Amino acid sequence: MRRSVLLMMLVCAVAPGIAGCSASAPETDREATPAPAPREGTPATPADGGTEAPFALTSPAFSDGAPLPAASAMKDAGGTNASPALAWQGVPEGTKSFALVCIDTHPIAGGWVHWAVVDLPADTFSLAEGASGGVMPPGARELKNGFGEKGWGGPLPPKGSGAHDYVFTLYALDVPTLDVSDDAQIADVNKALEQHTLAKATLTGTFER
C-alpha cells in the first residue's frame, strides 16, 4: 500500500496534468470564503423592499383639494368655527417640534391667516376636530389669526367670490420652541420658520358661499 502511494506521488510529480493529480485540496478541506461586508454608508434596504413614508399631512374629515367640513366655517358662514381634524406621518429625524399655519390663498383674501400654531410637541401626530381653544397639546401656542383672535378662525369668504383654497402647512422644526410672540405677524413667523424647518407638508381644503 505504501509503495502504491509513493508511486502515485512520483507520477504526479512528473506529469501533474494526469487526472487525479490536481493540486487543489478536496472541497471538504477548503476554508469557507466569507461574504463581502456592506460598504460603510450604504443604506439598509427593508426586508420587504419598502421605504419610509414621506412627511405627509392628512385629515380624516376631508381629502386634499376637497371642501372643508361645514363645521369648520365661521358661524356667519353656516359653521361652528371648529378647527378641522388633522393627522401627520413620516416625521423627519431630528424633529423637536411642529408649527402649523393655515392661509387663504384666494386673491381677494390677500394671504389671510386662519390658524397659526407653534411649539407643538414632537410626539404629537394629530389634532382632533375642535382642538383649537380647548384641547391643544401641552405647550402648544396658538397665535393671533387674521381676525385678531388666538386660535382657529374659520372660513368666511365674501359671498359670490367663488371657492377659496385654505392651505394648511405643517412644519417639522429642529427647535422645541419657536422664538416668536403670541401676536407675531405672519411675516415674522415665516422668517423664524425658514431658519428651523427640516421638512414641511401641505393639505388644501376649499370653501365657498
Image (tube, grey):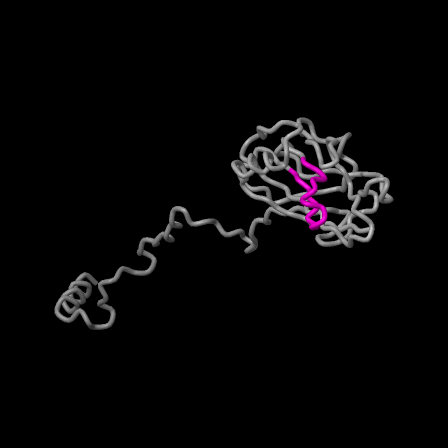
Q: Above or below — where is 62 with respect to 148?
A: below
Does the image show residue 49? yes
Q: Above or below — where is 180 with respect to 80?
A: above
78 vs 122, left or right, is: right
Which of the 4 image quarters holds residue 149?
top right
Counting from the top left corner in percent of width and height, residue 90 is at 60, 45
Q: Above or below — where is 42 with respect to 175?
A: below
Quarter containing the N terminus: bottom left
Does the image show residue 177? no
Counting from the top left corner in percent of width and height, residue 13 is at 14, 66
Q: Which residues are magenta?
A: 100-116
Between 19 and 175, the one lying in front of the other is 175
Counting from the top left corner in percent of width and height, residue 65 is at 72, 54
Between 78 and 130, the one lying in front of the other is 78
Which residue is at a point 34% across and 54% down the rendered structure image? 33
20 vs 42, left or right, is: left
Which residue is at a point 31% across and 56% down the rendered structure image? 30
Residue 112 lies in magenta, yes or no?
A: yes
Which residue is at a point 78% across and 50% down the rendered structure image? 207
Which residue is at a point 19% across and 63% down the rendered structure image? 5
Q: Above or below — where is 98 with respect to 38?
A: above
Counting from the top left corner in percent of width and height, residue 163 is at 76, 53
Residue 149 lies in magenta, yes or no?
A: no
Q: Across the whole image, how many numbered discs are drawn on residues? A: 0
